[in-house]
Amino acid sequence: MPVTAKRCYYEVLSVQRTASDADMKAAFRKLAMQHHPDRNPGDKDCESRFKEINEAYDILKDADKRAAYDRFGHAAFEQGAGGGGAHGFGSDFGSAFSDIFEGIFGMAGARGRTASGRERGADLRYNMEITLEDAYVGKTASLRLPTSVTCEACSGGGAKAGTKPKTCPHCNGQGKIRHAQGFFTLERTCPGCHGRGQVIDDPCPSCSGSGRVTRERTLSVNIPPGVEDGTRIRLAGEGEAGVRGGPAGDLYIFLSLAAHTFFQRDGADLHCRVPISMVTAAIGGEFEVPSIDGAKTRVKVPGGTQSGRRFRLQSKGMPVLRSKQSGDMYVQVVVETPQNLTRRQRELLTEFEKLSSKDTQPESSGFFARVKDFFGTGTGPS
């Protein structure tokens, strides 16, 4: 059979010879996803095209291989000289196609593990309850929590003083082992080093080779005025120490507000309910209420105030986070019905009822007038 000449690698990827690495990578991702065998089951042409795309990118993504190809063409890699060809699909498929997954999922490795075996420490959560007054003025809080910190004896390396970690003999420091199985190359975490690429023959006695120990720390956190229930504060680098000298995680503080005896909060506004006497509601008066800043505020009640009426006290609410504005305070009055009346009090109220007219109680008079019209009777309050 005649031998089919190989196509130009630049032509395979549909890029110019002057294309940058970024352009080359973008072209490879697009074509590889389009012709991947999993998306085209049973299509031999796509399978062949996919191998061709992978082979071209495997050569052109490497600066040295690309320079050799630009100078000598395909001849630079014939007879195994450059590691390209069909065998490159099996041996380098994982590294080449991983570029696709990195672009799609934003992952370049397993859980922040670096090639040197260092792992980022875990993030921590701390729940803190504060009062409404604390949320109003802000505060600097001190908290104590046990967490993993870098081992001082080995400086986080995990090896006993005077020794060093060694390259894992199972994976040659790669942290993963590849195994060819038919068309695909499977990749799994190295069982010898658990993906770190290094092994410690003589671990540090203080941390047993992990590079970190558990200690109780005291931290200071600034809580700004205006924080709300559920506010999250992030302290970068204050989480668990990383493994084998890796970077520390973050500490997230979740704030919750304790119930207040007087105020209910709605965003930046505060609400409270104040009971007033029937006489104060009828003829008017005034009363004092506390405000969240600790001062007292007088509220004037006009005559004829009905139960449920709200009075707005401007800018007496909570501060708006990271702003110079403040919410308002709303005082809702509730008219209290007298109880445990003496005989004389009952007589006076009865006399008052007899003297009342439609003008003094317009709402109830109007209601029972509508009831009378509805039934066609003289129904009224008993």
Image: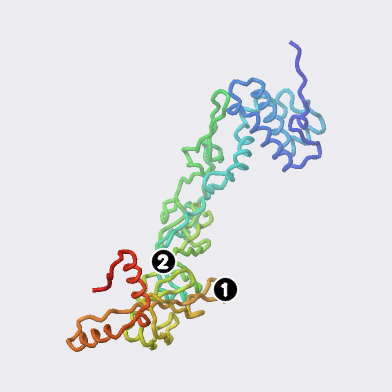
What amino acid type should be assigned to the residue bearing mark 2?
A: Ser
Report the Cα–Cα distance between label 1 and label 2: 21 Å
Nearest the camera: 259 or 316? 316
271 to 301, vertically: above or below: above
Q: Secondary structure at mark 2?
A: strand
| Amino acid residing under circle 1 | Ser
- In the image, residue 221 lies at what x, y percent? 48, 70
Tell me the mark number nearer the camera, choosing from 1 and 2.
1
**313 relative to 23 in the view: left or right:** left
Is residue 222 something one can see in this rendering?
no
Against 300, is 7 above or below? above
Q: Which mark is residue 256?
A: 2
Nearer to us in this view, 119 or 276: 276
Quarter holding residue 311: bottom left
What residue sits 74% from the left and 29% below the top? 12
Residue ID at (50%, 80%): 314
| Residue positioned most to the left | 343
The answer to whether residue 104 is left or right of residue 142 is: right
Up-down relation of residue 54 to residue 2 (above or below): below
Percent of width and height locating residue 99: 63, 39
Outermost residue toward the front? 376
Q: N-terminal of the two: label 1 or label 2? A: 2
Q: In the rendered image, which residue does mark 1 sit on?
A: 323
- Of 193 and 200, the residue lying toward us: 193
Nearer to me, 268 or 249:
268
Left-right relation of 345 to 44: left
The N terminus sits in image quarter: top right
Q: Secondary structure at mark 1?
A: loop
